[in-house]
Image: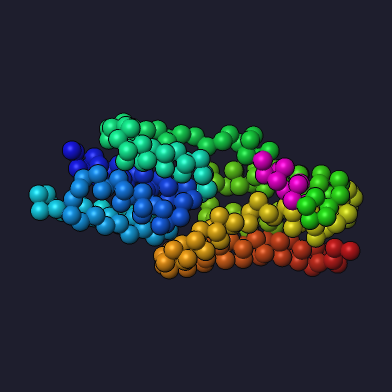
């Protein structure tokens, strides 16, 4: 067996899962299962939300240790599912090691959904969350427009590699401004607070909160706390963005109503 290829395959699978929103204990489990195909005595991996540390050792080889920094993370659960499926097939001898590595490379290179689908999904999510929170039809329309603006801003700023904090802050600021304009000056919507709450729901870090809880319960306290802090920072950026938007109108136009 090509042990270096096995090691690279395990790390690539772990990187893909960690980069696209998987829990850290699941990433460790996947790496260890793939490395166990070597039947070596020492198989260790330690995963945090920002890095992977792994070691493979046996009296028959020189120790192999690798550290992988994972800086850019996003939510793409389809890639997590595909990677998990490939690792299972490899561990049950349904595919060869070379085939598994090639398939993982294809998963890594696969493109996400196009911009039109992303914008449409965020717009509809914003609109229907507003309905769930008690909004009416015209509130739904304003939230859909907010969703289009949020998705467009995020797609534009991501091209310049703007940090997640400023992405969410600028998006929530714009949606607050748009909501006030539509409710007070056009007017189309009726419920300012419901529209804002519904519109910010696509920005809420639900996956990070869920992973923080699951990692903590699983005993990965470092990862659990890290993801909880990440979720807190995202929540703060959203709150600050909306607060700045409302404060701008209060300061220069004498308040919303």
From the viewer's perspective, is 191 left or right of 46?
right
Residue at the image point whose x is 78% and y is 52% from the top: 132
From the viewer's perspective, is 40 left or right of 169?
left
Image coordinates for residue 172, horizontal then vertical, percent = 68, 56
Q: Which secondary structure type mostly characterizes the magenta part of the structure?
A: helix
Quarter of the image where the C terminus is located: bottom right
Residue most toward the left? 60
Residues in magenta?
Answer: 121-130
Residue at the image point whose x is 65% and y is 61% from the top: 238
Which of 43 and 53 lies nearest the eye of the viewer?
43
From the viewer's perspective, is 161 left or right of 220?
right
Which of 135 and 152 lies nearest the eye of the viewer?
135
Q: Is residue 156 above or below residue 210?
A: above
Judge whether residue 125 can be spotted in this image.
yes
Which of 255 and 212 lies nearest the eye of the viewer?
212
Image coordinates for residue 76, horizontal then vertical, percent = 52, 44
Image coordinates for residue 3, horizontal then vertical, percent = 19, 43
Residue at the image point whose x is 70% and y is 46% from the top: 125
């Amino acid at each position: 067996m090509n042990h270096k290829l096995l090691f690279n395959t395990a790390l690539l699978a772990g990187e893909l899962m960690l980069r696209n929103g998987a829990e850290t204990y699941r990433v460790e489990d996947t790496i260890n299962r793939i490395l166990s195909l070597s039947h070596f005595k020492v198989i260790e991996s330690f995963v945090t939300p920002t890095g992977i540390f792994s070691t493979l050792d046996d009296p028959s080889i020189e120790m192999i240790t690798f550290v992988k920094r994972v800086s850019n993370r996003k939510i793409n659960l389809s890639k997590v599912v595909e990677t998990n499926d490939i690792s299972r097939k490899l561990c049950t001898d349904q595919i060869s090691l070379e085939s598994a590595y090639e398939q993982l490379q294809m998963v890594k290179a696969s493109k996400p959904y196009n911009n039109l689908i992303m914008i449409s999904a965020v717009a509809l999510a914003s609109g229907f969350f507003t309905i769930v929170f008690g909004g009416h039809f015209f509130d739904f329309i304003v939230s859909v427009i907010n969703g289009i603006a949020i998705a467009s801003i995020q797609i534009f700023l991501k091209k310049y590699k703007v940090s997640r904090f400023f992405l969410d802050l600028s998006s929530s600021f714009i949606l607050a401004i748009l909501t006030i304009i539509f409710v007070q000056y056009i007017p189309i919507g009726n419920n300012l607070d419901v529209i804002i709450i519904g519109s910010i729901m696509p920005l809420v870090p639900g996956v990070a909160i869920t992973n923080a809880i699951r990692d903590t319960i699983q005993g990965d306290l470092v990862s659990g706390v890290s993801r909880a802090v990440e979720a807190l920072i995202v929540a703060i950026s959203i709150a600050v963005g909306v607060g700045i938007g409302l404060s701008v109108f209060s300061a220069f136009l004498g308040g919303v109503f």
